[in-house]
Amino acid sequence: MKTALGLGFALVALSFLGLLGAMIAAADDSPTVSQFSRQFSPAKLTIAHGTTVHIVNDDNVTHHVYVDAPGLQFDSGEQPVGKTVDLTFDRPGSYTVLCAIHPTMRLRVTVE
């Protein structure tokens, strides 16, 4: 009897933790930027410092996201079709996110 109660309690606790994890994941307000037709969309963002931006390769070609700015150095390496790169902006300022493969691609990010 004690074993059945302990098992029941464990199942309820695991269900609650799973629900809590799903709620936390759903609360992710991080902006998503699409790479499509060799462009970032949207091309401009204004975000709070500490925000992570999800950059999704929705294109039919490989991309390579990078930032080379005072206070932020980032290089994704090759980003295959369908992959997401997460880029966190910890400091206020203005940043240009570029693609090393397609030099005309620019994403302007203002961090407040």
Image (spheres, rainbow, N blue to C red):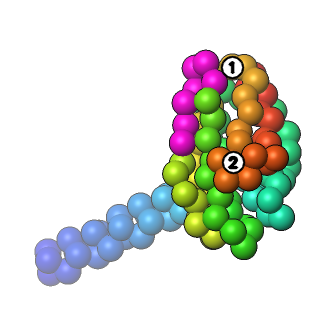
For residue 92, the mark is 1
Quadrant of the rendered structure where residue 87 is? top right
Instruction: Describe the element under mark 1 as helix, strand or loop.
Output: loop
Q: Nearer the viewer, residue 58 or 47?
A: 58
Badge 1, how many Cα within 10 Å: few under 14, some, many 20+? some
Residue 11: where, in percent of width, then height?
32, 73
> Residue 82, relative to residue 73: is it above or below?
below
Q: Quadrant of the N terminus?
A: bottom left
- Quick one: 79 or 88, which is closer to the camera? 79
- Give, as a three-letter code, the residue at label 1: Pro
Identify which residue is drawn at 63% across, 35% down. Answer: 67
State whether the magenta stretch is mostly helix, strand or loop: strand
Q: Secondary structure at mark 2?
A: strand
Residue 38 placement (x, y as % from top left): 80, 59
Q: Report whether residue 26 is seen.
A: no
Work out which quarter of the rendered image holds the C terminus and state it.
top right
Q: Is 72 in the magenta?
A: yes
State how many labels appear.
2
- Relative side of 62 to 2, left or right: right
The label number, if any, that marks residue 99 in the structure image: 2
- Residue ID at (80%, 35%): 108
Q: Would you say residue 21 is visible in this rendering?
A: yes
Question: Of marks 2 and 1, which one's residue comes earlier in the chain?
Answer: 1
Residue 10 image position (x, y, % from top left): 28, 69
What whole-number distance in Å separates the C-alpha atoms at marks 2 and 1?
Answer: 22 Å
The structure residue drawn at horizontal position 75% and vertical position 59%, both measured from the top left corner, is 35
Mark 2 residue type: Cys
2 vs 1, front mark: 2
Q: Residue at x 79, y 42 (%)?
A: 106
Looking at the image, residue 108 lies above or below residue 111: below
Task: Write the start and end of the magenta stretch as one range.
Answer: 69-75
